Image: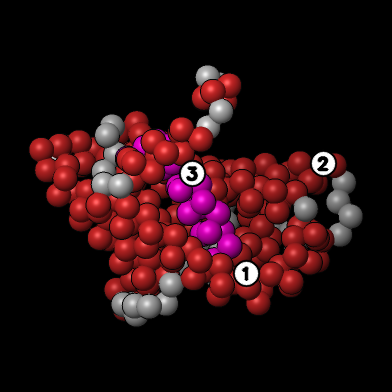
Amino acid sequence: MGQGLGVAVAFSAGLFSFLSPCVLPLFPSYISFITGMSVADLTADLSAAVRRRVLLHAVAFVLGFSMVFVALGASFSAVGQFLLDYRDVIRRVGGALIVLFGLYIAGVLKLALLGRTTQWQIREKPAGYLGSLAVGVTFAIGWTPCVGPILGAILSLAGTAETVGRGVGLLVAYSAGLGVPFLLSALALGPFLRFFKRYRPFIPVVERAAGVILIVVGVLVFTNYYVVLNAWTISLTPDWLLRRL
């Protein structure tokens, strides 16, 4: 699997996870919970000190779920390295799983197993930034049905990675795709809420688009054309940019 293309796919998957109906509508609630402020207070005109506090809590939350996702990626990659002699089999199985996840997200398949959610709930957030970190860990462990299939697809890619480092890189990219819009939205919660009111009707379309992309990626991985596609994208990249990558 080409590393550059894999990182782009993983980052896009994280972005789709953020835009999913299981994450985006709950975003204001997460921010309110980890900061201890009401949504009304957060949408008001905040001082620089309060904005900085909100951002730091959001950073701690993102670090929390990123730690779990990256640890999972390292585990899947390590298993893939241990079974190096069976790499082709792992690649085909991983590709088939990605297609399965894509069909589920696109609404073509209805599988009860993928729809189950394990939720660890914290009724009272521990104080301080460590509390926000703990909430982020809880969010990652109790992933929702929307995040689970997309994350599972990226973990399947990590299992086919050439090295553990590349597998970890995929989950770092996935966490960035999920975390960067979270941080940007935390900086401007008022504009985010106005955007969400307009975006809500398009959530099913975005979800189906994510499913189609995963299906295509899964087919490419299964047939080993992922490497061919990555070589093609590299050929289109300007030399000056390649020298800086």
Mark 1 lies on a secondary structure that is helix
Pick whichever of labels 3 and 2 is earlier in the sequence.
3
Of 192 and 124, the residue lying toward us: 192
Is-magenta flag for residue 15? yes
CA gap between label 1 and label 3 equals 25 Å
Label 1 CA crowd tier, 10 Å (few <14, some 14–19, many 20+) = some
Mark 3 lies on a secondary structure that is helix
Give amino acid for label 1.
Pro
Residue 142 visible, this orientation: no
Pick whichever of labels 1 and 3 is earlier in the sequence.
3
Total numbered labels placed on residues in the image:
3
Pick whichever of labels 1 and 2 is earlier in the sequence.
1
Q: Position of residue 22 (x, y in %)?
A: 53, 69
Q: Quadrant of the N terminus?
A: top left
CA gap between label 1 and label 2 equals 26 Å
Q: Residue at x 75, y 65 (%)?
A: 195
Label 2 near label 1: C-beta < 8 Å? no
